[in-house]
Image: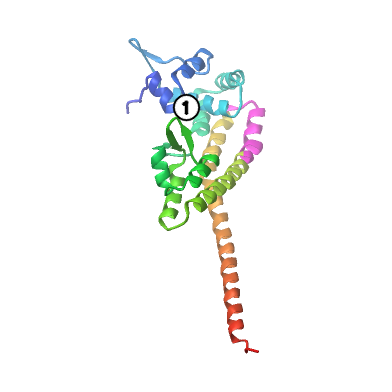
Amino acid sequence: MTEIMLTIDELAREAGTTVRNVRVYQDRGLLSPPERRGRIGLYGPDHLRRLRLVLRMLERGYPLSAIRELVEAWEERRDLGSVLGLEEAITAPYQAEHPRRLSGAEFREWLRGDEVAVARALETGLAHLEGDEVVISNPRFWDVGLELLDEGFPPRAMVEAAAEIARTMDHVAQVCVSLVSDHLWRDFFDAGMPAADAERVAGVIQRMRPRAQAAADAALAEAMERHTDEVFARTAERLASKARQRRKPSA
């Protein structure tokens, strides 16, 4: 199977960065030079994995010097396969869908013209502006909200519920990531990232997503059942109270 090769423009676009940044990272030794084909430099999947790793670490506040030290440590102490396996586990996207882009008018139409709902969606980070466009970073999450609107739920109520769910799941994600960081990654890193453990660590990281999703789904199912029972119990009590009131003899 032919390996897909990318120009520097295509590489930057796939990773969500700029050509200028790609060149900076290459100059700093964070990205290996491209394969030359005539006057054109081409980048492969390994370059894309490395670039995504660099970008994720930058987002988390690591300086370029620290990222370079980590990359050099991996390459000095491990065979190439173990390094790439770890990079694949760390940089593999959790979302398969690309962000969805809408005009402001389309986004307002989505929310039934409710300007308050539009403002809250932007304030809470459910969507964000890029120039004249509204960007939905998690289209699948939004599609669920649109289904609720089609069922007749008010846009403002849907947006507030979605924002609360997003906040709650952010906390759940932090718990899961901290579990891996505190009880797997830290020991692996402190031990010098031995090659013998690299495959195991990469495998655990890759399996964490389905495990976290399964745990969250199971906990949600139990909580939904409990709270639904509470709502119906309160409703039944109100109905019983009204029935007792009707049966009371008039004075």
Q: Position of residue 143 (x, y in %)?
A: 42, 48
Is 50 in front, or is 128? 128
**Residue depicted at 47% across the width and 51% down the height:** 155
Q: Secondary structure at mark 1?
A: helix
The answer to which quarter of the image holds residue 9 is top left
Identity of the residue furthest to the top in this view: 39
Q: Which residue is mark 1?
A: 49
Residue 110's x, y, as percent?
Answer: 41, 46
Q: Amino acid at mark 1?
A: Arg
Residue 212, compared with residue 40, is above or below; it is: below
**Quick one: quadrant of the C terminus?**
bottom right
Task: Determine crowd level at label 1: few under 14, some 14-19, many 20+ residues with C-alpha closer than 10 A.
Answer: many
Picture residue at 56% right of the left edge, 63% below the top: 225
First to last magenta residue range: 178-195
**Residue at the spot 57% in from the left edge and 48% down from the top edge:** 164
* Vertical placement of residue 221 versus 15, above or below: below
